[in-house]
Each structure stands twice: as structure tokens, then as C-alpha cells.
Amino acid sequence: LTNTATASAIVRTARVGVPVVYFCHGLHVTGQPRARDRVFLAAERALLRATAGVVVLSGEDELWFRARVRTGTPVERLDAGVGLDLERFAAAPMPAADDGLRLVWIGELVRNKRPLDALAVVACLRGGGIDATLTMLGDGPLLEQVRAAAPAYVDVVGRQDPVPAITAAHALLHTSEREGLPRVQLEAAAVGRPSFGYDIRGVRDAPGATAVGDVGDTRTLAAGIERWWGAGAPPPVIDRGVLDWRHSHDRVTALLARVAGG
């Protein structure tokens, strides 16, 4: 069982003498494939000749592989990735709405996560009359730039334990431009919080998620949050059992047994 594109490519071309199952965390192609995307996808397709099974995280990746693998090659999609320790991410009641809408953003502060978009989304919400605040967790090369741009209603706190921040928030804001299946959205769902992000692969597959607008369309993303808030901020309807790491473990184990002939 091998994952990450480079390591998996090496293993699948090395003739290791045993069946190789590829755990694809995400093809990371958004919209119409660019030239470099087409080169990457062509390489992935060629490597399928040495692939005995595939594990994927998104519906679009599942369709892509199913249309291209050899007949009989199993493709398994995990609804919640590798899953979570549900004892750590315990369900918690939604905070009261009296103090306004509290959002949380969690991730690496790098360009493809688009942390500055989160500031624009909250500004749109406040411009529409919603008393919205945002707490941002994470570290990275854009940390100081985000801190400098953050208004008083945005608290950029750096790297911290996400559980207290998710529990204190009404919803998770996720502004990444490409994803496999965002773990932070699973964590929010486990606590009982919805998440909102751009309409891209991975994000739209996450339990409890609402995918709204194209990448960079912060107004449309804010409008999706505004509709949810105006509807009374309902918590997500999810099956917590699917989020348990044991659920994912059992499905991958079953696939490996099938590939091995067990």
C-alpha cells in the first residue's frame, strides 16, 4: 500500500514483486486541466498498468480511476479519508448566536490555501449586516502578511490545537483552491460544525460541507454562509460512524485482502 504521487510512482515502476495498491490522496486538478495537469494525468494513467487496486478520497477521483483501470481492478472511495479519533473530536452543541457569527479557518498559511480570501469573505458578511468574526489557526510563509491585513474582527493566532477553536465556532471556513479531502472539514463535522468552501473536488465530498462558487469568488462563498446563518445555522446531518478511523481501516483492509487473494 503506497501513497503520495512520487513515492507511489517509484514503487509502481520498481517491480517489487507483489501487488501494489495506490492510495491517491487527490489528483489535485481543478476545472479544465492545464498543460502540466495533462502531463501528470498521463503519467498516472500509464502507471495504472502496475496498479492492483486504488483507494481514493473524492467522487471525481473515483470516476477518473474507474474509467481507466484494468477490468477487475478494485477502486475504493473512503468517505472520510483515513478517519478520525472520535474521542478527541467529540460532538459539541452549537454555540448560542447571541454574540454573532463565529467562524474558524484552519490550515497552512500558503498561497494555494488562499488565507487572504477568508478575510474577504468575512468582510462581505459584515458588509451585509452580519456581525461575523473569524479565528484563523495555522502557520506558514503568509502568516505575517495575513496578520498585517487582518482587521480587528479577525484573530490570527498561529498554530494551536484545533478542537477548542472548532467547538467555539459556528462553522468552518475553508478557502483552499485544490484539495484531496480536507481533514479539517472532517474534524469540523465530527464536532458538529458545518464547513463552507469553494466548489472544488474534495471540498464538495466532505461530510457536512457546502461547496459554493468558483475559486476566488469570495462574494458567492459569503452568500452561501449568509443563507445558512439566515436559516437558523442548522448543524450538519452526518453519520459519525463513517468518520471513525476504524471504518476506513476496515474498508482498506478488505481491499488489500481482495487484491492479495485472501
Image: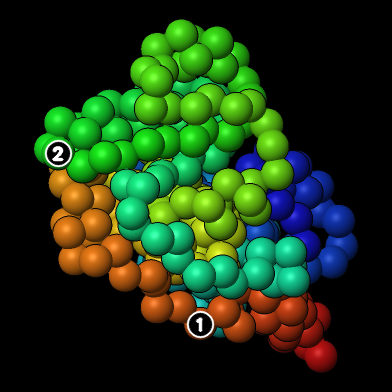
Among the 4 quarters of the image, the one containing residue 259: bottom right
Tally of marks: 2
Q: Quadrant of the N terminus?
A: bottom right
Give the numbered dot on residue 239.
1
* Amino acid type, residue under disc 1 in the picture: Asp
Left or right of 112, for residue 99: left
* Amino acid type, residue under disc 2 in the picture: Gly
Q: Where 72 falls versus 203 (above or below)?
A: below
Instruction: For marks 1 and 2, give the one nearer the viewer.
Output: 2
Q: Could you tell me how far apart the alpha carbons at marks 1 and 2 are, in whole angstroms?
A: 34 Å
Q: Tag 2: Cα neighbours inside 10 Å, few (<14), some, or many (≥20)? A: few
Of residues 258 and 162, the one drawn nearer to the viewer in this rendering: 162
| Residue at image coords 81%, 54% | 15
Give the numbered dot on residue 129.
2
Among the 4 quarters of the image, the one containing residue 132: top left
Extreme residue in the right direction:
17
